[in-house]
Amino acid sequence: MSRWFGRSTVLDPAEAPVEETAPISPLLLRVAAKESAMLDGQVAFLQTELAQVDALVGEAAATLQQALNTLDARVKAQHRLALAVQEAMHISGKGIDSTEATATLSTTIVGTLDAFVNNMLEISKSSMKLVEEVEDIRERSDRMEGMLGELGEIAGQTHLLSLNASIEAAHARKFGAGFAIVAAEVSKLADRSTSLSGTIQDQIRGTREALLRTDTQVQAIASKDLNLAIQSRGESESLIQALDESTRKVRDLVAEMETNARLIGEQVGHVVRSLQFEDLVHQTLQACMQELGNLQEQAGAWRALRADLEGGGDAGQLLLRLSGTLDEVEAAQVRFKAVKRESLAAGDVDLF
Amino acid sequence: MGKCILTVDDSSTMRQMIAFTLKEAGFEILEAADGMEALDRAKGQKLSLVITDVNMPRMDGITLVQRLRALPEFRFTPILVLTTESGMDMKQKGKEAGATGWIVKPFSPEKLLEVVNKVL
């Protein structure tokens, strides 16, 4: 009996020398069978749990690696998009970006408004000149009217003198001196008429010149306003068109960046889910550690049995003690619950 | 200030992942490592939601749910259980203790936010 118990390992019950240990063999066989079954179960349990850990860690590592690769690609894509946005903000052919274009547009509009204000001032000044010119024309017209009246009087007097000259001419043979006086008066009137005619012509010339200046002023103002307005409008339209194109490109790129951000968010979600493997693996490893503790307890019980048997202890009592210890370990195993998660796929949700 | 959520788990990784997910959505997060600490943290706090694990040292999640439900200020506060436990018997225990819902680990951030917004 001592030779059998002195062996260093627990043997298959079939190997036990039944005829030598007949008095205790049924109990020994029962204990040995229980221990063997427990060990098998514990080994199987540990193998399962460790395989589960291996699977979880492998899946988590693969998922994290994939997520990081995707994140890296997405971050690079985001960087490229940011550069593209910057490029889109640059308006081709004008050497300015859209911010500069906006500033230029603003400056152009302000400049245009300034130009219009200045034009309004010039128009006001020109209008004043026009008023003065018109007043000058009116005064000249008044003077012309006065002169024309005087010419009428001269014409009347000339007519009377002409009649007188005719009368006196009838008597010329007797009073030639009187005719000479009338003729002299007619000559004076003719001189006055000539002088007035010249003055009127001067006034008319002046009037024409004033009207010509007025016309030139008005044409200059009209031409200046129209050219400036057309030029400003063209520049503004060109800038606005360029801004529209730039804005459209930026809008498209921003939409692409939003898609990219969503994909990055999904990858972050994968990372968050995969990192939870730490908790799952921790619980599984805790279960393994507890099971190893059970194995240690069983090994200790067997060591104690061997020592006590070698010390001459009652084999039956010692085996009963061992059996009791194994029962306690088994009961602990029944209470123990291991993590059942075998995948990192998101778990179910149940709202009560 | 956003609504305050107490998250209870003995795994710091889990607490961090929950906090990461919910803070991004604008929630304020309080953390506790077990049921006992959770009861202490909950005192005097106006919590909109409690998310608790089940298997924890000192006080497990089911007991925490029972203890919180016994407090008048947490009688109607939503409590979600977030655990690796997926058995029907444990779910039934959680339901009887007063839990609002049961989420099996691991969680996806999107799904957790959806559930949180649903119970709030």
Image: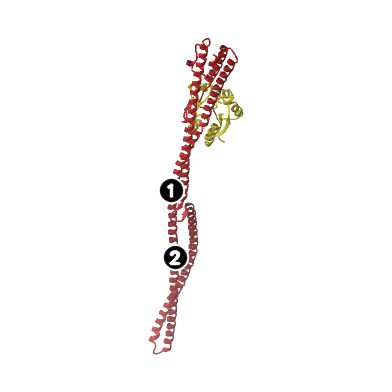
Chain colours: A red, B yellow
Disc 1 marks a residue whose amino acid type is: Lys
**Label 2 and label 1 in one chain:** yes
- CA gap, disc 2 and disc 1: 44 Å
Residue designated by label 1 = A249
Badge 2 amino acid: Ala
Report helix, strand or loop for mark 1.
helix
Rendered image quadrant of residue B27: top right
Which comes sooner in the sequence, label 2 or label 1? 2
Helix, strand or loop at label 2? It is helix
Classed neighbour count for the residue bearing mark 2: other residues with Cα under 10 Å, few (<14), some (14–19), many (≥20)? few
Q: In the rendering, at what x and y percent does residue B51 appear?
A: 54, 29
As drawn, the label of residue A220 is 2
- Of the 4 image quadrants, the one containing the N terminus of chain B is top right
Is A261 rendered above or below residue A120? above
Residue B111: where, in percent of width, then height? 48, 32
**What is the chain identity of the residue bearing mark 2?**
A
Residue A302 visible, this orientation: yes
Q: Which mark is residue A211?
A: none
